[in-house]
Image: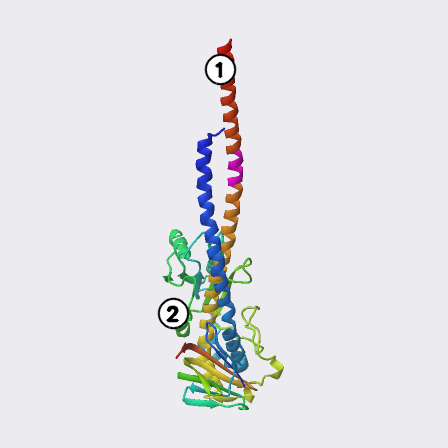
């Protein structure tokens, strides 16, 4: 599935991934391929994007996560590398 | 005719000016490149936000969200905050003057309708002008510079949003330089509050520009009813609307910063070209003056020799 992580200033991540674990407003959510269309608010915490055995981590706060078809979009108000 | 020595001095002076303007042109060009990248890099976020808000928005929600509330009062007694973005520096042609003119035009227009205007000035040039015009500003700041951050936008627009929600303001508008290209940067007034809801196809309602859907056309995206929404459409919208307002101001800041560098590059290029022309002209005059002097000296020597012979 295709994952993009964007902050107000730039796109932080853009590529395919096997799983996304995001801090939603009420706890962690895990997104695997073929997830149903989904839209949720983000809280504060660590976003993990899993690509095979490697994973990228970002500290995010605010914004939303959207799953449409095979695309996951994380649009966060603040994104810092962590 | 001017003395050769005088001319030589002027040539030197113009040459050193040209060196400065040439360097400034190069600096502006390289900064412009990065500023342009920032304008482009800010687009995915704006697009995504506009798309989702467009999906969730329904006209009947307008009364429930203070940020969407259209002012009921009109004309007299209304209060509008005008955020005027200018550069901190000059040497950029009419760039700041154009922004200030646009701001003055808008102020006059609003005041003619009987609307009160709060000025929020960003950038030294705007502050200096309105101080000169003896107009008090509600707030002013000069720390934004060439590389605006999302936090700057949040700090500026945060208090305005709460005033708007409290009903102390009826609208918030921004005067900024729209960055169409490095040479086309028209000063523009954009209303950021009340929010003009973006249409569901991801274009913003307020401005018909480059915010367009990149990921999918509206036809193959599910509508709001199709999503699993957590916590709920209302709650999501409530969180995202302030982000949208902030982002609009952020984009105005980034575009103005890029537009400033574009204007500065053009101005410095013109200055460099002009200096080149002046140098050429002075050089020619100098050569002629020098030649005339030599000719005259020769004539004097020859004349003197003739006189001795006689």
Chain letter belonging to callout 2:
B
On whether residue B186 falls in the magenta region, the answer is no
Task: Give the image location of residue B188, x and y in percent.
Answer: 51, 61
Task: Give the image location of residue B294, x and y in percent.
Answer: 50, 26
Question: Is residue B109 in sight in this rendering?
Answer: no
SS at mark 2 in the image: helix
Q: Is residue B227 above or below residue B157?
A: below
Camera-side residue of A63 and B59:
A63
Question: Is residue A4 in sight in this rendering?
Answer: yes
Q: In this view, does B265 lie above or below B291?
A: below
Q: What stretch is highlighted in magenta?
A: B278-285
- Please give the residue where the numbered disc 2 appears in the rendered image: B155
Name which residue lies at 41% across and 53% down. B129
Q: Is residue B109 above or below residue B237?
A: above
Chain letter belonging to callout 1:
B
- Please give the residue where the numbered disc 1 appears in the rendered image: B304
Which of pointers 2 and 1 indicates the residue nearer the eye? 1
Task: Give the image location of residue A20, x and y in percent.
Answer: 47, 87
Q: In this view, does B159 lie to the left or right of B178?
A: left
- How would you rate the neighbour count of disc 1 (Cα within 10 Å): few for under 14, some for 14-19, many for 20 or more? few
Mark 2 touches mark 1? (CB < 8 Å): no
Residue B250: which quarter of the image? bottom left
- How would you rate the neighbour count of disc 2 (Cα within 10 Å): few for under 14, some for 14-19, many for 20 or more? few
Give the distance between the C-alpha atoms of the residues marked 2 and 1, in whole angstroms. 83 Å
The rendered magenta stretch, by its main secondary structure, is classed as helix
């Amino acid at each position: 599935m295709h994952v993009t992580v964007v902050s107000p200033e730039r796109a932080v991540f853009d590529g395919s991934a096997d799983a996304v674990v995001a801090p939603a407003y009420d706890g962690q959510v895990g997104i695997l391929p073929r997830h149903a269309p989904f839209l949720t608010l983000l809280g504060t915490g660590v976003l993990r994007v899993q690509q095979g055995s490697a994973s990228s981590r970002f500290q995010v706060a605010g914004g939303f996560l959207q799953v449409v078809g095979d695309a996951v979009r994380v649009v966060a108000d603040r994104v810092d590398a962590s | 005719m001017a003395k050769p020595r005088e001319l030589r001095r002027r040539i030197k002076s113009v040459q050193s000016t040209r060196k400065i303007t040439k360097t400034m042109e190069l600096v502006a060009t390289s900064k412009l490149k990065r500023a342009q990248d920032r304008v482009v890099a800010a687009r995915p976020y704006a697009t995504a936000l506009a798309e989702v808000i467009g999906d969730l928005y329904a006209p009947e929600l307008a009364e429930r969200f203070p940020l969407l509330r259209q002012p009921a009062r009109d004309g007299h007694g209304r209060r509008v905050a005008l955020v005027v973005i200018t550069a901190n520096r000059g040497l950029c042609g009419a760039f700041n003057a154009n922004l200030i003119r646009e701001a003055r035009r808008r102020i006059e227009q609003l005041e003619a309708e009987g609307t009160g205007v709060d000025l929020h000035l960003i950038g030294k040039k705007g502050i200096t002008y309105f101080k000169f015009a003896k107009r008090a500003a509600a707030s002013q700041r000069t720390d934004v510079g060439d590389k605006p951050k999302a936090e700057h936008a949040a700090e500026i627009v945060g208090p305005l949003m709460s005033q708007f929600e409290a009903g102390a303001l009826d609208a918030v508008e921004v005067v900024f330089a729209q960055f169409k290209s490095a040479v086309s940067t028209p000063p523009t007034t954009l209303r950021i509050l009340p929010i003009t809801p973006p249409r569901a196809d991801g274009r913003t309602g307020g401005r018909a520009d480059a915010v367009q859907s990149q990921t999918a056309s509206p036809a193959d995206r599910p509508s709001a009813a199709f999503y699993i929404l957590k916590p709920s459409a209302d709650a999501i919208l409530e969180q995202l609307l302030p982000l949208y307002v902030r982002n609009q101001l952020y984009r105005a800041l980034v575009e103005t910063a890029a537009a400033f560098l574009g204007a500065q590059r053009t101005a410095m290029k013109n200055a460099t070209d002009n200096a080149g022309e002046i140098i050429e002209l002075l050089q020619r005059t100098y050569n002629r003056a020098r030649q005339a002097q030599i000719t005259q000296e020769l004539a004097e020597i020859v004349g003197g020799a003739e006189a001795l012979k006689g």
